[in-house]
Image (cartoon, helix red, strand yellow):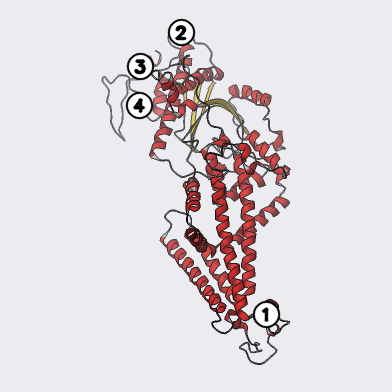
């Protein structure tokens, strides 16, 4: 197997997790998607007893800080919108009922349609009807208000309440339940200035609606400013300049931030028993094999252990960082293959069950080394040692992590090869830059039109925001999570913010990374077996079989070979096969 060339320049360092494009997109996502933001806050902020999932290629603490900041912005704007809307409804109760009815239906329309790219036709139709019913209702209320402003229909919308309502409920007579609305001491007299009539109330209601449109436009402008400022490509790598990091007034959040940054990238992974690889993505071509350790004929085999196997494997995998022998000097420096940034280390998985405090986890360097030294040879069930190989491609959006475990027991060799792939960040998160750019470059008329189109549903959509904030505060106050028994991560905010598929180029890269690492692992184990005096024929056959690349056939003479699927392949007799395995 090739070894690193001494003259090769040192491989470039991988990008810092807190400065990667994947991290930037996830920070943008907490401003775009309230549901994703709530999941981040629940997992990392509310449930303080949970260990974080490993953060491959991003900084979960930075995402959390931006989620807290985005929630503050959203709650503030929600309070403004709800107060303005209630004020408009109180000023003009008649039109206010229709305004509320319209905004509720417009806010329900996206929920009815769903978030799928191609929803069920029934959802499309019902969402369309709900949206336009809300718009027409809202437009009718505006028409009444504008008519009242110009004196149409008597005193405008307030004329709906003119005249005392009798006991029969249809007017006429006195003693009605709403007699108190009339007169200088009544409710209308408190709102209507002398001589202003319904026109003044209509003007005030319309002014409040204009303020709502301005608030919606300002909220959109704030998001665009965040994307063009601290979340821009040029400024995001400067961690110290990020306003979300300035949390001096919140010691609890500062302590949580520091704890996350100490835990998320540690070589010790505290896991939940049901999902030990949470945070690493989807499994990709996972396999394991076991072969008998048979000495070669005429050779006295030496004992081998797990540490020796991994010692052989590691330098071969690390040699993947070296460019082609023809790429020397500036040519070698220009090679941009992501394998040059490959990271190899050893990690230990520990179950979180049975611990009494989260801060009692053995994250100290000496404690981690003790667990590593003990776990590499023990072959335990809950505590497991792996050689971990990570390649971050596409600006850390596609992260391949390969776990390798070698174990010898009872004259048998077991090899486990478990690649996992983190898929790219969601397309709507990656589109945040374009959305901000379009808004900032849009004309004033275009911005006003956008705000008018979204102002109708904004107040009703603000109510769930306030409700979720109150519910989360109540859960945090009464749940006792801060002092709860520790547990592993329930979800990964990186996986939650991931797309559902890879592009063709990304899939090709993932397969190349996995196959390259797989070949080097197999070569290292084979070399260790051969030098220790063991036969390697059976191991080579099993590697080819489990990796899905065909059936090992060394000699086709006097053999029947099937090509294609669902074919039976005849192999040589047992005596000849045993002789080959003993070579």
Mark 4 Cα within 10 Å, few/some/many (few <14, many 20+)? some
The residues bearing labels 4 and 3 have C-alpha atoms spaced at a distance of: 19 Å
Separation (CA) of disc 4 from disc 1: 89 Å
Taking depth in this image into account, of 333 and 367 the one nearest to the observer is 333
Q: Are marks 1 and 3 in contact (CB under 8 Å)?
A: no
According to the picture, the residue beneath numbered tag 3 turns out to be 575
The residue identified by callout 2 is 299
Frontmost of labels 1 and 2 is 1
383 sits left or right of 398 in the view: right
Q: Is residue 472 above or below residue 18?
A: below
**SS of the residue under disc 2:** loop
N-terminal-most mark, 2 or 4: 2
Residue 147 vertical position relative to residue 450 in the rendered view, above or below = below
Give the residue displayed 48% in from the left and 15% down from the top: 528
Crowding near the residue tagged with mark 1, few <14, some 14–19, many ≥20 C-alpha atoms within 10 Å = many
Question: Marks 1 and 3, Cα distance to the nearest angstrom?
Answer: 105 Å
- Whole-percent x, y for residue 473 in the image: 69, 53
Q: Label 3 crowding class (10 Å Cα cut-off): few <14, some 14-19, many 20+?
A: few
> According to the image, label 4 marks what residue?
551
Q: What numbered label is drawn on residue 411?
A: none
Q: Nearer the viewer, mark 1 or mark 3?
A: 1
Helix, strand or loop at label 4? It is: loop
Q: Which mark is residue 188?
A: 1
Callout in the foreground (4, 3): 4
Q: Nearer the viewer, mark 4 or mark 1?
A: 1
Q: Position of residue 284 (x, y in %)?
A: 45, 35
Task: Kindly report the distance in space between the C-alpha atoms of the residues bearing marks 2 and 3.
Answer: 20 Å
């Amino acid at each position: 197997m090739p070894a690193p060339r001494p003259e090769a320049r040192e491989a470039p360092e991988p990008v810092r997790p807190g400065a990667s494009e994947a991290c930037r997109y996830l920070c943008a996502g907490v401003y775009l998607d309230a549901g994703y933001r709530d999941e981040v806050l629940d997992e990392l902020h509310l449930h303080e007893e949970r260990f974080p999932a490993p953060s491959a290629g991003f900084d979960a603490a930075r995402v959390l800080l931006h989620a807290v900041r985005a929630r503050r912005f959203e709650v503030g704007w929600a309070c403004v919108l709800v107060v303005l809307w209630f004020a408009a409804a109180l000023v003009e109760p008649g039109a206010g009922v229709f305004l509320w009815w319209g905004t509720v239906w417009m806010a329900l329309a996206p929920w009815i349609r769903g978030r799928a790219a191609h929803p069920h036709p029934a959802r499309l139709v019902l969402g369309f009807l709900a949206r336009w019913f809300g718009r027409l209702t809202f437009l009718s209320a505006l028409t009444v208000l504008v008519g009242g402003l110009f004196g149409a229909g008597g005193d405008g919308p307030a004329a709906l309440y003119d005249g005392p309502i009798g006991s029969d409920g249809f007017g006429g007579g006195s003693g009605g339940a709403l007699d108190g609305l009339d007169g200088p001491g009544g409710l209308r007299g408190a709102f209507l200035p002398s001589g202003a009539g319904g026109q003044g109330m209509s003007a005030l209601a319309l002014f409040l609606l204009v303020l709502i449109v301005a608030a919606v436009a300002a909220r959109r402008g704030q998001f665009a400013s965040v994307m063009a400022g601290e979340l821009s490509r040029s400024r995001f790598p400067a961690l110290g300049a990020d306003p979300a990091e300035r949390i001096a007034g919140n010691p609890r959040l500062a302590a949580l931030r520091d704890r996350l940054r100490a835990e998320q990238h540690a070589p010790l992974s505290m896991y939940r028993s049901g999902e030990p690889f949470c945070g690493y993505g989807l499994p990709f071509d996972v396999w394991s094999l076991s072969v008998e350790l048979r000495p070669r004929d005429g050779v006295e085999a030496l004992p081998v252990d797990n540490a020796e196997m991994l010692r052989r494997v590691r330098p071969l995998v690390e040699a993947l960082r070296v460019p082609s022998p023809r790429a020397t000097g500036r040519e070698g420096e220009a090679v941009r293959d992501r394998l040059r940034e490959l990271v190899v280390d050893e990690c230990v998985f520990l179950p979180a069950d049975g611990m009494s405090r989260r801060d009692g986890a053995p994250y100290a360097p000496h404690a981690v080394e003790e667990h590593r030294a003990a776990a590499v040879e023990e072959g335990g069930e809950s505590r497991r040692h792996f050689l971990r190989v990570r390649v971050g491609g596409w600006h850390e959006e596609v992260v391949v992590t390969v776990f390798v475990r070698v174990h010898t027991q009872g004259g048998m060799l077991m090899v486990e090869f478990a690649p996992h792939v983190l898929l790219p960040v969601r397309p709507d998160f990656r589109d945040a830059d374009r959305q901000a750019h379009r808004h900032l470059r849009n004309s004033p008329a275009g911005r006003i039109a956008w705000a008018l189109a979204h102002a109708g549903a904004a107040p009703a959509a603000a109510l769930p925001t306030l409700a979720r904030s109150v519910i989360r505060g109540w859960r945090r106050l009464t749940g006792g999570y801060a002092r709860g028994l520790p547990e592993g991560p329930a979800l990964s905010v990186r996986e939650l913010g991931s797309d559902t598929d890879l592009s063709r180029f990304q899939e090709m890269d993932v397969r190349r990374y996995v196959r390259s690492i797989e070949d080097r692992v197999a070569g290292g184990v084979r070399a260790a077996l051969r030098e220790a005096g063991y036969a390697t024929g059976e191991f080579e056959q099993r590697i080819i079989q489990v990796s899905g690349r065909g059936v090992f056939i060394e000699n086709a003479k006097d053999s029947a070979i099937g090509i294609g699927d669902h074919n039976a392949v005849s192999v040589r007799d047992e005596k000849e096969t045993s002789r080959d395995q003993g070579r």
